[in-house]
Image (cartoon, grey):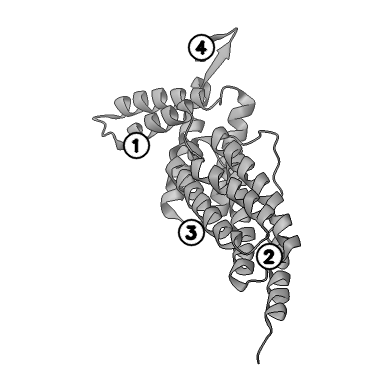
Amino acid sequence: MAYTVSELNSSTFMMSSKCAAVFEIPITSNGRDKVHHSVCLELHRLIDRISHVTLDIESARPNCKLAMEALCSLHFTLAKAKSVIKDCSKCSKLFLAITSPKILSRCQKLRNAFELYLSEIQDAVPIPLADKISAILHDLRGAKFSLEFAEEEARKVLLSLFEKNFPDKASMEKEELEAIQIATCRLEIKSAFSLLVEKASIKNQLDEVNGRNQKEKELLEYLKYLLIKYRKSICVFQDGDLSLTS
């Protein structure tokens, strides 16, 4: 059965609208992401700009199958970007710090996808809208995703702990205590409440993993073990000075 260009355009537009409705993930801009603040802020900025121009693209209804398919893919990519921010708000801080290369990789792939789909749309829309897209493409090419110093330090100290071989239990416990104290301090886990939140996040992640990813499960179990075993020695700030509870 043959279709006219206008019929195909209308059909694809309806598909892109359905994509937007089905994959809409609300995000907040109140800075509640636990870790990767700078990464989430950059994603927020890109999502806001692309979401606004997406509305303009839908209104323009580009008369091109490739552009309309790219528009639908753009909605999928926006949903994935919002999912990254959601993960950074609900997952364990320690887990996020350790697995930060994965988050950075996801962000790079999202940026590349945004650039690809917007480029495919750019030539199929009116010039004023194409200029808007061009400005966003310029921003995308300059977007940088990187860890903050505290996050990188927490990650390094924990990875160093995982890679060490210990001659005895006493040596292992000494290194574990030092590593978890440094990591929790850097990630702002300094109070009984923040420790409770961190353990709850780990528990929720373990419930979600449910044996599907054995390595992730083992990592989460070990982090949970460290927090429980050394909970009384987690570093806290008192009167502006760094001290350790005994």
Question: Relative to residue 110, is residue 69 drawn left or right?
Answer: right
Q: Earlier in the sequence, mark 1 or mark 4?
A: 1
The residue type indicated by label 2 comes to Cys
Task: Give me the residue at 56% from left, 62% from top.
Answer: 120
The residue type indicated by label 3 comes to Arg
Task: Give me the residue at 57% from left, 51% from top.
Answer: 207
Q: Earlier in the sequence, mark 1 or mark 2?
A: 2
Q: Earlier in the sequence, mark 1 or mark 3?
A: 1
The spot of residue 14 in percent (x, y) is 73, 71
Question: Where does label 1 land, which residue?
Answer: 162
The residue type indicated by label 1 comes to Phe
Vertical position of residue 94 compared to residue 102: above or below: above
Q: Earlier in the sequence, mark 3 or mark 2?
A: 2
Question: Where does label 2 land, which residue?
Answer: 19
Question: Where does label 4 land, which residue?
Answer: 242
Instruction: Name the secondary structure under disc 1.
Output: helix
The outermost residue toward the right is: 59
Q: Can residue 83 be seen in this snapshot?
A: no
Q: Badge 2 local density, few (<14 within 10 Å), some, or many (20+)?
A: some
Question: Where does label 3 land, which residue?
Answer: 212
